[in-house]
Image (spheres, rainbow, N blue to C red):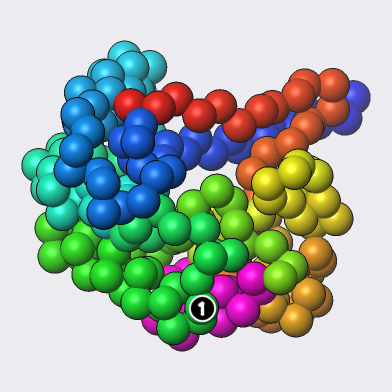
Amino acid sequence: MPQERKMTNVLTVDVEDWYMDIDISTWELYEDRVVESTNKIIKLLNESNTKATFFILGYVAEHFPELVERIKDEDHEIGTHGYSHTPITQQTPSEFEEDVLKSVGVLEKITGDKVMGYRACQFTVMEETAWAIDVLKKNGLKYDSSVFPVKTHLYSVPNAPLFPYRISPADITKETDPEEDFLEIPFAKQVRSIQFHRKGVRA
């Protein structure tokens, strides 16, 4: 009989508050719920002895460093979700780099650990923003998890691989260089007959 293959699943959480799709200049007007909601997620993960990667918004980390510390203390991986929750499609390369570096600086100051991974606001690493990969590589990140390999009206790289691959800004729809050291971990689409969906739970 053929040997049964086991699949490794990667669980990720974007740590942002419910109002963070609107302009950052208004954020202080709204009630914060991110700490309470994230703590509930951590509790559920503890109950099932499950670890996850938390992509934390730099703004959230700056205002709630104790939340970042708890995520680290629970032995989850910490990645960056940028600082201002601005889609890459609305940033120049220099603005994007500034946003990434600001968020990484905040997270590394709190944790003392190097940030390795990035997830874009609204999954906006797409063919028209492929230059973002070079910015991430230039600044020492090792992987991205922003490619959404299914067509939507907001964001998509519908021809991208469904499983982790070595991504290059020359063509983010396929692995063009197996020696490339920067990894793309695309969002799960479908495995056999099981359909996986992105679920956004606002704090």
Q: Is residue 135 left or right of residue 25?
A: right
Residue 112 image point, x, y percent: 15, 63
Q: Give yes or no for residue 141 being in the magenta stretch.
A: yes
Q: Give yes or no for residue 137 being in the magenta stretch.
A: yes
State the residue at coordinates (13%, 44%).
64
Q: Is residue 23 left or right of residue 7?
A: left
State the residue at coordinates (44%, 83%).
94
State the residue at coordinates (90%, 24%).
1
Q: Is residue 181 above or below residue 116?
A: below
Q: How many marks?
A: 1
Label 1 is placed on what type of residue? Thr
Q: Nearer the viewer, residue 78 or 61?
A: 61
Residue 16 image point, x, y percent: 34, 40
Q: Is residue 128 left or right of residue 88?
A: right
Q: Is residue 37 above or below residue 168?
A: above
**Magenta region: which residues?**
129-142
Instruction: Tell me the quarter of the picture where residue 58 sits.
Output: bottom left
Image quadrant containing the C terminus: top left
State the residue at coordinates (51%, 78%).
92
Q: Nearer the viewer, residue 191 or 151?
A: 151
Q: Is residue 92 above or below residue 54?
A: below
